[in-house]
Amino acid sequence: MYGLGNNNSNNTSSFTTNYSMSTMNKRSLNQTFQIMGVLGIINLIVSLYLAFGKGESGSCDFSATVSCSTVLNSPYGKILNVPVAIFGITWNCFFLYAVWRAMIDDRVSHFITGIYIWCSAGVGFVIYFVIAEMIIGALCPFCTVVHVINCILMYYAFKLYCDLKTPPPMLNVAINLRNVIVLILLMHMIILICFKGSPVVPLNESFSQCLGRKNMVFFGSAGCHVCQNQKALFIDTTKADSESQAWKYVNFVECKGNAACTEWEITRYPTWILFSSDFDDENKTELSRKEGYMNKRELSVMSGCKYDENEK
């Protein structure tokens, strides 16, 4: 098969002689790789912003339900304690490397197959994150940009893979790209080690007490996974004594079999409501509400309570 740049000067032992494209010529293949490269660079830039940009500044927060910080600071914003944006950076780096190698290496079909597999994994992650956004009840705009680009890249990767006359066997691909595979594994092992052992510091008692004084009420259920993640924001796992936890100051209403949740039309867990007076006051009125997981900054904005910005 033709490479976009041939590394074998004698042309006697091409890795891909039997794996040619069905319809694409050298020029169209090169143009496709260039388009994928540009999209990959845009993807990388957005991922870098999501990982290291100042999300707290609100530059990506347009409303309570359209907010990057809401999604990224939720429990779903990390996998194995690693921010998902970090995985986005590594994904794009290896993707761009594969596209570059496909343009200069004789093993074009191997790299096309590798890119196809890599993009498939990327789309799988997109599906995970979209489901997470639905559970959280918020949309991350910049994340959506990455998702759309990933889907476009998947289209191009699938198109290239289908245009191979005879796709190389997966074992053959793994052998030829073994150095890249080892590098991917080592890179992610290092990342996991670097982020290991940095548990989230729970909110302190003074903040929880303030939430109680401001008449913030948390409606949820013990069987709700997102509710458990919300509750974990107020629990220090290093303390065995439940009386020393900030959680005890939170006004929590268990909705299972509770008429109060029906009265206040609670249809989704968790739901936070800011009331005008104590929850036991019959004359209380609802001032505002937010459905879905809320991080520290959102709770602070909604209630007016301040938290220590140095807390993780």
Image: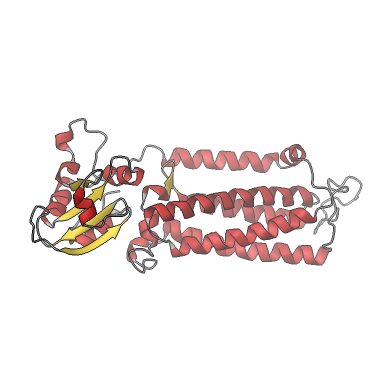
Q: Locate residue 201, reporting x and y percent.
A: 27, 44
User: From the viewer's perspective, is residue 304 above or below residue 97?
Assistant: below
Image-based side of 272 in relation to 191, left or right? left
Identify the image quadrant of residue 39. Answer: bottom right
Q: Locate residue 172, reporting x and y percent.
A: 77, 39
User: From the viewer's perspective, is residue 109 above or below residue 144?
Assistant: above
Image-based side of 223 in relation to 76, left or right? left
Q: Does residue 241 appear in this view?
A: yes
Residue at (36% x, 66% y) in the render:
61
User: From the viewer's perspective, is residue 110 above or below residue 143?
Assistant: above
Identify the image quadrant of residue 223. Answer: top left
Q: Locate residue 203, reporting x and y percent.
A: 23, 47
Q: Does residue 309 appear in this view?
A: no
Residue at (16% x, 53% y) in the render:
211
Q: Residue furthest top?
A: 240
Image-based side of 176 in relation to 119, left or right? right
Q: How is the image coloured?
A: secondary structure
Image-based side of 244 in relation to 9, left or right? left
Q: Locate residue 175, reporting x and y percent.
A: 74, 37
Choose between 16 and 223: the one closer to the eye.
223
Residue at (24% x, 55% y) in the render:
272
Choose between 252 and 185: the one closer to the eye.
252
In this figure, what is the number of numbered marks?
A: 0
Residue at (69% x, 56% y) in the render:
157
